[in-house]
Amino acid sequence: MSATEQALRLPELLLAVFELMVSDRSLVPTTQVNRAWFDCATSILWRKVYSRVLYRVAEHRRQIYASKIERLEFDGEEAHIHEAFQGLQFNHLKTVTLDLFNPPKGGSTCLRQYIQPTLQTFNFCGGDLDDEFLLQMKATCSRLRAVTINLPGPRVTPSAFLGFISGLECLEDVNLNDMEGLLSDAMFLDLAGRSNLLRLSWGTSIPPRLITRTSNETVAPFKSVRKLTTSVSTSSVAWISQNMVHLTHLILKLEDYKEDVLKPLPKLPNLKRLRFSFEPRTVLSTESLVALRSLNKLETLDLASKSRGMKVYNARGGTFQNPDFENLISGLPLLRQLSLVIEAQLSVRAGAILAKHCPLIEECNILKNFDTRLLMALAPEDKPMFPFLQRLNVRRATFDRHEEPQTLDLNQPTLNQPAEPFPEPLV
């Protein structure tokens, strides 16, 4: 065998070359060259697959590919597939996503094959788990860094769930929703004291008494958290701003309208995404809203309520107007998504103001009435007004009667369609 032939069989060389071809279907034929090429190419092609792709493989060949899978996704009620996979070894599995899992007679035993020491991310989106499954996962998956669990079912007990979460010491990303009976004060306090926790989605309200207890019992609570999603009272926002100083994403549902929640936010200079859902009777301060201009890293600003629009007044009782709007967004040059569902005296000129100061804007929801004729009159002649705009939400639009309606798509988000899974190599 020549030196060239030997080189073309080196796994490290083949993998480096094949990595460059991963988006090209020309990689599939390389599996037919020889055994070395097959092993390397399938290691790339089969890293991430949907369960049904592996299920379509002949039963006697499934293990060949199961041992190469790093990310496995189930997207529906597929109990028959879980049963078919029970004898397989997924010894390189890093991420598994289970959706709508309803167990057969054996309960969650048909999921045991996914509990691997290599597992780093576990996503469970509705179904029926049990204490035994969580206990085995805690004992086996010491590298688990991300856990998303929604609707785990009635067989999981609060004590077992607390033991599961508290026993996973490497957790960086915790997303727990639709399980109010399982989210306890003890679990919240455990998470608050972790220095490695980066993202937390807490699917039940955090009452002020628990905030007080966290302050009293935890040194530097949530000191490393970058993303927080939960429900709180308005009185807790100041505490969040003071303690979670590294936040980049803050997504809150506010349960009352007692305090000005915008006022403490400038203490979070690293914020990139701010999304608040307000109570209908909320009244915002113009001064506090404009002060958000200091958050110059913001890419998303979303302030909305269940009602038609929140009232915004300045100290003199005046409403939010075009100059206030310009004062706000002139400090937010990186803004990509903007939604201000407020009662304001903003004219179509606000669109031109937005185009001037936020050239990267992709989604916008600010205007009550939208007259394209007036906006076009304000637009520059030599370049697009909103070069990256994907979605525009308005209440009412006015067009010239001779204008083709399809020339302005008011609500057309750009979606990335999922690619078809790689076919099974023909070997």
Image (spheres, rainbow, N blue to C red):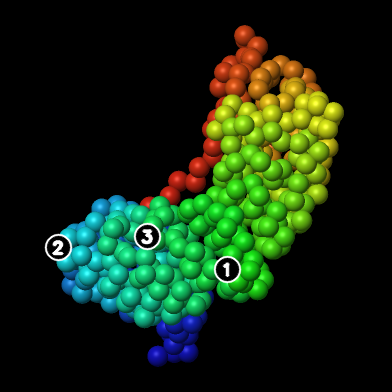
Q: Earlier in the sequence, mark 3 or mark 2?
A: 2
User: What's the mark number on residue 307?
Assistant: none
Front residue (pair 207, 133): 207
Q: Which residue is labeled 1 in the image?
A: 192
Query: Residue 245, percent across and down?
Result: 71, 62
Separation (CA) of disc 3 from disc 1: 23 Å
Q: Is residue 350 above or below residue 227?
A: above
Q: Nearer the viewer, mark 1 or mark 2?
A: 1
Q: Earlier in the sequence, mark 3 or mark 1?
A: 3
Label 3 sits on what residue type?
Phe
Query: Residue 296, percent across and down?
Result: 78, 50
Q: Image quadrant of residue 383? A: top right
Q: Which residue is labeled 2 in the image?
A: 105
Q: Nearer the viewer, mark 3 or mark 1?
A: 1
Label 1 sits on what residue type?
Ala
Callout 1–callout 2 Cβ contact below 8 Å: no
Q: Residues within 10 Å of mark 3 (few under 14, many from 20)?
A: many
